[in-house]
Amino acid sequence: MQTINSKLPHIGTTIFTKMSKLATEYNAVNLSQGFPNFKADTNLLELVNKAMKDNLNQYAPLAGLPELNEAVLQKTNNLYGSQYTQEEICITAGATQAIFTSLAASIHPGDEVIVFKPAYDCYEPAVELFGGKSIPIEMKAPDYKIDWNEVQSKISPKTKMILINSPHNPTGKVFTEDDMKALSLLTEHTNILILSDEVYEHMTFDGRPHLSIANYPELKERSFITASFGKTFHVTGWKLGYVLAPKNLMKEFKKIHQYNVFCVNHPMQVAISQYIKDDNMYLSIPKFYQQKRDYFLSLIKDSRFKYIPTEGTYFQMADYSAISDEKDTDFTLRMIKEYGLAAIPFSVFNKDQKCHKMIRFCFAKTDETLEKAAEIINRI
């Protein structure tokens, strides 16, 4: 039997796959993996269907359909006061590919990438694949603020990139003006790049603005911004996203992109280019998900779980320390088996997989699902 020397010997199946599989096996209510279980807008689905019937089923241009690119540029530039052009955008096979390709274009063996923990699980393996080294900085529980003095102490001559995510998965924290000013001060007069994961840009609550890198010219000139149509329009299985970057960075991104996927789904690009002409399709998202959050929290307010309402994303952290001393991986496994409820253990995102007795619920679900889940939560 032939074998290969694994490039990621310590990486196994993701926690999301594991928990969703267990949820199916035990017929559990699934609040683990981050995907909506309600239907997408029928208008969007009809636009895709029409594009397919119109025979728009062959390769799209490498960087994406010009009409979709133009619609995204108009949206971004209007929202954030930026001036991105057609040469500074590329449509991707989801935000994960956008992140992966940004790292592939930037990271050389020995480069260091600062990553804030807890962190989404696709970041560090990609850094490692390209010979880079992740420099983890822990966002301290329970408020999960970034200590920018610690960030400064970790910057070295090898620091190639700082990877940020706001609104943040899994904590739900949203970057503030102070965060953006600190990031700007730390990177000015350096060659440090920024990779900004902004897939939840339209999910900020209680009047908080999303502060995009695109808002800040001094940061924009050194940054890749990645975003997701799938997250925004409740169609995560479409795996469609995009990246924005200044011309010099986008040139290198496209060199990798052309041999990675070359181009992405044509009829879906046609559909979204038409769909987002109505800006209410994305401007209404914060209110929609805040209502979901508030309803879910109202249902579990008398439970033994402790929580602070999430600032953004469609995830809610919950502290179970009043219920059990178990490690979160054991607690979530027992919840599935004994109670029929699936959630994500928080330690999988943490530095050194530290357990702080926290789990993550996804509330991008129908009211019926949230009600079923809450009934279980209130019994635990």
Image (tube, rainbow, N blue to C red):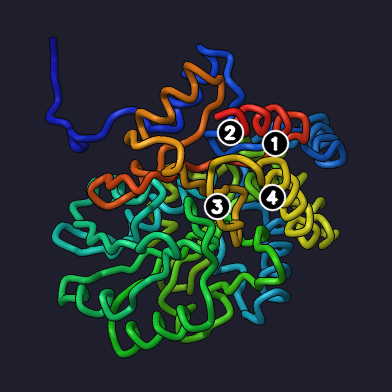
Which is in the foreground here, disc 1 or disc 4?
A: 4
Judging by the rendered image, the residue that carries numbered circle 2 is 31
Rendering coords of residue 208 (x, y %): 66, 71
Point out the tag, 1 or 4, that comes first from the N-terminus: 4
Q: Is residue 215 left or right of 97 when viewed as pictured?
A: right
On screen, residue 21 above or below 102: above
Determine contact: label 1, label 2, CB under 8 Å. Answer: yes
**What amino acid is at disc 1?**
Lys
Judging by the rendered image, the residue that carries numbered circle 4 is 293
Judging by the rendered image, the residue that carries numbered circle 3 is 307
Q: Disc 1 versus disc 4: distance between alpha carbons?
A: 10 Å
Determine contact: label 4, label 2, CB under 8 Å. Answer: no
Crowd rating for badge 1 (residues with CA inside 10 Å; few <14, some 14–19, many 20+): many
Check the picture and name the quadrant holding the N terminus: top left
Element under disc 4: helix
Determine contact: label 2, label 3, CB under 8 Å. Answer: no
Is residue 43 visible from the viewing direction of this image? yes
Q: Disc 3 versus disc 4: distance between alpha carbons?
A: 12 Å
Q: Which residue is drawn at 45% across and 66% down?
A: 224
Q: Residue at x 56, y 20 (%)?
A: 340
Q: Residue 365 carries which label?
A: 1
On screen, residue 27 above or below 42: above
Point out the tag, 1 or 2, that comes first from the N-terminus: 2
Crowd rating for badge 4 (residues with CA inside 10 Å; few <14, some 14–19, many 20+): many
Task: Looking at the picture, tell me which residue is in the foreground, 81 or 68.
Answer: 81
On screen, residue 333 above or below 249: above
Check the picture and name the quadrant holding the C terminus: top right
Element under disc 1: loop
Q: Disc 4 versus disc 2: distance between alpha carbons?
A: 13 Å
Rendering coords of residue 115 (x, y %): 32, 61
**What amino acid is at disc 3?**
Tyr
